[in-house]
Image (cartoon, rainbow, N blue to C red):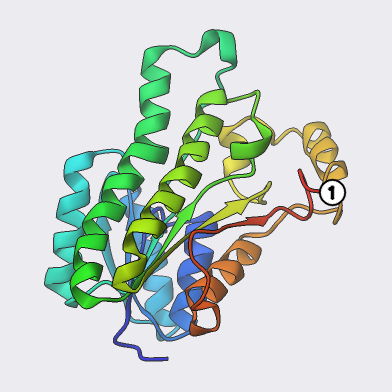
Amino acid sequence: MDNNKIAVITGAARGNGRATAFSLGKSGYSLYLTDLNSEELEETITDMKNEGINASGGVYDASVISDAKVLVEDVIKNCGRIDILVNNAGASKPVKFPNVDEETWDWVLDLNLKGPYFIMQEAAKHMMKQKSGVIINIASISASGGMTSSPSYAIAKAGVVTMTVTAAAYLAEYGIRVNAVSPGIVNTQFHDEVKISNPDVLDQQVKSIPLGRLAEPEDIASTISFIVSEEANYITGEVITVGGGKNRL
């Protein structure tokens, strides 16, 4: 692996993003990591460096469109290129269908769909000049199975699937691959955010998964590492579900 290749990961301070950073870093990529939480981001970057991984980064808001251009410009300025983009930043608000207001809708859609689109767009402009690159957008099994606790999140992630396929079709002629990874229920702090950390609720969720366990962040990270690798160089425009069989079996 050429360690001059640059992987950009948003929402990289914890959970799936952090695990993905470790996985790609150990595969030889140099990393540019972003997150809103400056303390957790600094800790993650320090942990990477302690493992001998070339890592840097900065605080950017994935929901703010103007930050997308600044982020990519900073990556190009500091690293010279972008080879991999993992559009991982995202969050949910547990507001059920009858109670979703415009503020909630805008916050969820901006962070999970609108922002990632424009980050992808800015990164793709540089990848098109390189005639190479891989983009991974993080979707969710809620995109196809619904999410009654947060319909706006499910709708946003369904949009991520469509934007992935659309971008893949356009960017293929430039040698750029675009895929989505669609996690199931992952053992991260996301549980607290969507209010399913209650042991009884979690137990019900685990029972609904054919493989009988929650995903770990490393399950998501290893899938991403494969898709960005040369072994997957004929895969584009796809949505890879990592859900232990949930919603499929």
Residue shown at 62%/66% (left/top)?
218
Query: Of residues 168 and 53, which is closer to you in this image?
Result: 168
* Foreground of the two, 84 or 11: 84
In the rendered image, residue 21, in percent from the top left (x then y), is placed at 45, 69
Crowdedness near tag 1: few (<14), some (14–19) or many (≥20) residues, C-alpha within 10 Å: few
State the residue lying farthest toward the top: 98
* Relative depth, front residue between 141 and 103: 141
In the image, residue 51 sits, relative to residue 117, either above or below, namely: below
Please count the marks in the image: 1
Question: Residue 193: percent from the left, percent from the top?
Answer: 56, 34
Which residue is found at the position 84% from the left and 39% from the top?
203
Residue drawn at x 36%, y 91% is 2
Say left or right for 82 vs 92. Answer: left
Q: Amino acid at mark 1?
A: Leu
Give the quarter of the image for residue 144: top right
**Place of residue 159 in the rendered image (x, y in percent of width and height, measured from the top left):** 46, 38
Can residue 52 be spotted in the picture? yes
Vertical order, 76 against 203 (above or below): below
In the rendered view of the protein, which quadrant contains the N terminus?
bottom left
Q: Position of residue 48 (x, y in %)?
A: 41, 75
Residue to which mark 1 is pinned: 249
Q: In screen coordinates, is 73 left or right of 190?
A: left
Residue 82, above or below 209: below
Task: Name the quadrant containing residue 191.
Answer: top right
Secondary structure found at label 1:
loop
Foreground residue, 107 or 18? 107
Using residue 225 as the reference point, say whether residue 39 is left or right of it. Answer: left
With respect to residue 149, does 18 lie above or below?
below
